[in-house]
Amino acid sequence: MILRVALDVPLPKLFDYRAEDVTRADIGYRVLVPFGTKHMVGLIIELAAESDIPNSRLRQAEKILRDVPPLGRSWLELVKFCSRYYQRPLGEVVGAALPPRLRSARPVPDAPCDFALAPAGRDALAAIPPRQRRLRALLTRLAQGPASVSELAAQARGARSLLKRGIEQGWIAAFVPERPAHRFVHAHELTDEQEQALRNLRRGFEKFRVSLLFGVTGSGKTEIYLQLIADVLARRKQVLVLVPEIALTPSLEAAFRDRFPGACIVTQTSASPEVERARGWMLAHRGLAHIVLGTRLAVFASLPEPGLIVVDEEQDISFKQREGVRYSARDLAIARAHIAGVPVVLCSATPSLESFHHARSRKYDLISLTRRAIHDAVLPAIRLIDTRVHPVQEGFTAPLLDALAARLARGEQSLVFLNRRGYAPVLACPACGWVKGCLRCSAHMVIHSTDQSLRCHHCGLGEPVPRACPVCGNPDLQAFGRGTQRVELSLKEKFPRTQILRLDSDAARTGRGLEDLLERAAQADILVGTQILAKGHHFERLTLVGVLNADGGIFSSDYRASERSFAQLQQVSGRAGRASLPGEVLIQTRYPGHPLYQALTKHDYAGFASSVLAERREAGFPPFVFEAVLRAESTDATRAMRFLRGAIDAAPSRSSAISLFDPAPMSLARVAGVERAQALLQSRSRPRLQAFLSEWSEALYRLPAHGVRWHLDVDPIEF
Ligand code: ADP
Ligand code: ZN
Ligand code: ZN
């Protein structure tokens, strides 16, 4: 027989290997094979009777790794879909989907299992010669019924290694004991609005269905999906919950553990240590985990009995994988729910325009929550401070400073938000106009005051701040603009004797990390932070949010910037007044009349989204057209462009349904010495775009690359 194996190499095909004694039951097992001079672990996708490769060159598979049960059909369908849709070789998708430990032949930490005799084991038992006494004894014992490892180990010496051998041979099957019992702790009487939402969600809940749970921050969306999860667990199914970032929402994991005592909850993130991630993955794969909670990569968790998928903060761009296999975990979650025939719930206070559009056009069910769940808690009042009327000094207008002072006097907490870390984003020479750029990127270097350095936020390059202008010798270099460090310093000058704490990724990297920082944050009088503060934290005393530099988001060349900006501002506004104290949000802007701010002050995301969607329809942008880009990267910009032109020449003939645009450098053209350019594709028909891409992709693999790395990015978010 021939095994057709998916290997993590950049070639769009499966690899054939000879193997004896294999059956269709081996599909989905990992297999160790020789590849060139190395060994690789791949996944058995198909069996075939013959191969296109001449027999003399066909190599033998080394070992089928039966310690991990085979990946199921629905999981294989998911990775195949991902491979087709995102135009990536199946082997690369499998490589991205499996935790690192499973991509190696090293032993995988297993979930607690019982063992039983497989049908092949019965035949083996008859054939094993009597002198293999211990093996016979073990199989004979299992022929009488399943047993646990400890039971078997007590019975015979060396039982563990015999078990391992038996499993590898396919004689013994590990089987999963019952999922442990769990409870659901009811914490709140639901509000009428929540009740209604829950009733709607429960309807037709045992088949595929996409619901968009759209509710203002604090409206109790989490509470609703926790209850839904309880329903699903009661039906003995498993639940997958995707969140943008677990490190930023430690309270969410705690909430899961509090509300589902006794449940087996596993987390899957790229930050977890390899063995831990593999252990959690195995618990899910064996069907023992009740809930898998994870970041985008968790969309590939193996779940034999899925019952529900939840995507929280579905608009978050961190669901899009931006290197390697460039998938959107939100979109794959929907594909996965479709394959498995289970419901998927997307949650957000500011849904992506794609999802919002689908909800409005009834492709998804729209379930809205308009009020905060906690009795008396109201949405914060959002006020705009016109910086043309109130001049900005050291980053602050007088009304914002007054508001901060008032909070200090009342012993309440404030948050000053700006989305720029470091001291200042630009170092320049006012005499000759020199600006400090990164040697390796087309970007300015950012001044950091904590160690008097310049750092590139794109490639990480660092160097000391120069004493004088390297062009004209002027010693009076100036810092333009302001980041969190500069704001922290000016606040310290303005409000001496107050506790001011900066929370950004630089601060999280020093000292004892983010968790410690968040703990200390509860005590501080003023927090200065970037978007790492915007999400899921609750600060009891926080009643004021001041936003600096918000205008950047409304004049970006990226058509998605305003959508993101709204989401972020609303999210950070949601930090104000979560508990019994009413909250206030002050946004400093030169453009208070801008529709984005006007909608924001009215908490009217739906109105904002509708007007942006109308613009997008007019201009021909997603979600009204579908996009993909072919990107080329090279140390030499002309090579990258030449490759793209060649690729366009090699493109299959196309109907008017497909527009393929001339190549152009990316807006950030150079990163870490690599020049990046791309050609954009658009179509109003997704199937036609898909068909074109798969034909084109075949041609691309045949094209000479000449020092160029290329990839297709389907539904790109970077331009
Ligand atoms: P969201 O996910 O919409 O931002 P959460 O589910 O986190 O909202 O709820 C916000 C706060 O309201 C939480 O502190 C939660 O415990 C509380 N909460 C949710 N539902 C209720 C309810 N029915 N009664 C009282 N408090 C509630
Ligand atoms: Zn100069
Ligand atoms: Zn750089």
Image: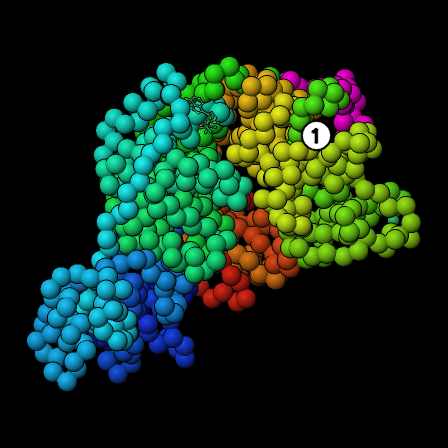
In the displayed structure, would residue 539 be above or below residue 6? above
Crowding at dot 1, Cα within 10 Å, few <14 / some 14-19 / many 20+, comes out as many
In percent of the image, x 14 and y 85: which residue is there?
131
Instruction: Tell me the residue at 63%/19% (across/down).
Output: 584
Which quarter of the picture shows residue 89? bottom left
According to the image, what is the colour scheme of the structure? rainbow
| Residue annotated with mark 1 | 525
Q: Which residue ends up furthest to the front in the rendered image?
A: 154
Residue lying furthest bottom in this view?
131
- Judge from the rendering whether residue 501 lies leftward or rightward of residue 128; answer left or right: right
Q: Amino acid at mark 1?
A: Asp
477 to the left or right of 31: right
Image x and y of residue 117, in percent:
15, 65
Residue name at image x 54 percent, y 41 percent: 248
Is residue 655 located in the magenta-colored stretch of the structure?
Answer: no
Answer whether residue 398 is magenta in the image: yes
Query: Where residue 66 sits in the image (x, y, percent)?
Result: 26, 67
Q: Is residue 215 above or below residue 140?
A: above
Please state if 312 lies on the left or on the right of 416 as rendered: left
Q: Position of residue 121 (x, y in %)?
A: 14, 70
Q: Residue at x 58, y 48 (%)?
A: 666
Q: Nearer the viewer, residue 645 or 390?
A: 390
Vertical placement of 223 versus 104: above or below? Answer: above
Residue in the foreground of this view, choosing between 133 and 324: 133
Quarter of the image with the C terminus in it: top right
Name the image quarter holding the N terminus: bottom left
Give, as a single range, the part of the protein colored magenta: 382-402
Determine the secondary structure under disc 1: loop
